[in-house]
């Protein structure tokens, strides 16, 4: 072997990832977030493993949108919640979007119930209730499948703090191919003072399983998003179930006190934490 030729071991070491990839000092912050930061580079491109991670995340996001919600399994999970043992039967409903393609192409169809579902709820002759819970597949069936039942369990536990009879519940509804506004129609038909829509949010590349919560006072067809309060990113690695339940419980109390939700109702459930117990008022909240 010529002395000008590098040894095989030297070539092997030069091809190791640490030698090929130019690291980014921001990478260490990745332990605190799912966001893609400090990925490094190989030449002018992303390192191969980071590129493959991106493709996997994109595939998971697509799956979250297109995979159907397993309604029987979800209903079984809900029926196993102890707090719902004596609750009215869960209602399985459908929007006017007959399939996923129609749902994605016609958002307006996802905002209204089909005629069979309207008749189903009308036939219940429901008694007025404080809250109707509506579980909607939305744009991420994965979010609903994994997070709906645990969150409802946390919410019912939080509501029980006000006493066993403080909050009356309408029958829980599970809606296929639905969007947020469909809760207005469900709540109106169930004669509920407030409606909570739990919906799978549009998946991101780091959060394909994010659950959104939308609270509306005096629901009725035709309301806009200005009439709702939203709590988003509810999932084990986002806003955990207990904290989300406490925030929603606060909003419910305030909504009943003020008779409204939306732009007129501010979420001040975190004021104490933001103030830090210092006695100095946070200017963002004044």
Image: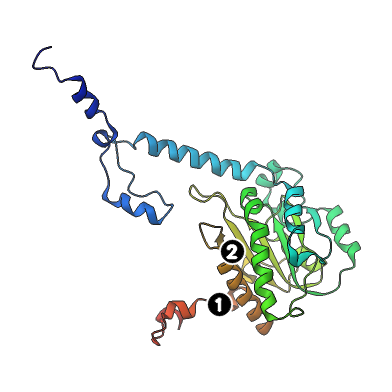
x, y percentage for residue 138? 66, 52
x, y percentage for residue 234? 57, 60
Q: Between residues 178 and 145, which one lies in front from this camera angle?
A: 145
The quadrant of the picture occupied by the N terminus is top left
Is residue 141 something that shows in the picture? yes
- Compare marks 2 and 1 and give the one earlier in the sequence: 2
Colouring rule applied to residues: rainbow
x, y percentage for residue 232? 56, 62
Q: Decide: is 112 above or below 100.
A: below
* Residue 116 appears left or right of 280: right
Residue that carries the numbered disc 2 in the rendered image: 241
Which mark, residue 104? none
* Residue 122 appears left or right of 105: right
* Residue 12 appears left or right of 86: left
* Residue 80 appears left or right of 50: right
Q: Between residues 98 and 125, which one lies in front from this camera angle?
A: 125
The quadrant of the picture occupied by the C terminus is bottom left
Residue that carries the numbered disc 1 in the rendered image: 266
Marks 2 and 1, how far apart in space?
A: 20 Å
Q: Quadrant of residue 218?
A: bottom right
Is residue 221 something that shows in the picture? no
Q: Decide: is 239 above or below 157.
A: above
Q: Residue furthest left?
A: 3
């Amino acid at each position: 072997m010529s002395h000008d030729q590098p040894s095989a071991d030297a070539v092997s070491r030069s091809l190791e990832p640490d030698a090929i990839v130019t690291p980014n000092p921001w990478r260490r912050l990745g332990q605190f977030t799912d966001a893609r930061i400090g990925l490094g580079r190989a030449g002018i491109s992303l390192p191969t493993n980071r590129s493959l991670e991106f493709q996997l995340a994109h595939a998971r996001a697509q799956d979250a949108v297109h995979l159907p919600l397993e309604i029987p399994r979800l209903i079984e999970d809900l029926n196993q919640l102890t707090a719902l043992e004596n609750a009215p039967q869960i209602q399985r409903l459908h929007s006017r979007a007959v399939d996923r393609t129609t749902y994605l192409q016609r958002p307006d169809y996802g905002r209204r119930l089909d005629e069979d579902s309207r008749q189903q709820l009308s036939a219940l002759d429901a008694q007025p209730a404080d809250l109707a819970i509506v579980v909607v597949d939305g744009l991420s069936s994965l979010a609903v499948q994994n997070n709906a039942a645990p969150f409802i369990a946390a919410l019912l536990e939080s509501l029980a703090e006000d006493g066993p009879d403080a909050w009356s519940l309408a029958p829980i509804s599970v809606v296929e191919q639905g969007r947020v506004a469909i809760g207005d129609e469900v709540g109106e038909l169930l004669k509920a003072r407030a409606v909570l829509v739990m919906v799978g949010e549009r998946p991101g590349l780091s959060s394909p399983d994010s659950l959104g919560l939308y609270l509306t006072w005096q629901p009725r067809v035709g309301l806009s998003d200005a009439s709702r309060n939203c709590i988003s990113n509810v999932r084990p690695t986002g806003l955990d179930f207990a904290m989300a339940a406490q925030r929603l419980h606060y909003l419910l109390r305030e909504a009943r006190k003020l008779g409204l939700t939306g732009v007129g109702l501010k979420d001040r459930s975190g004021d104490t934490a933001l103030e830090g117990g210092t006695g100095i008022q946070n200017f963002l909240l004044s």
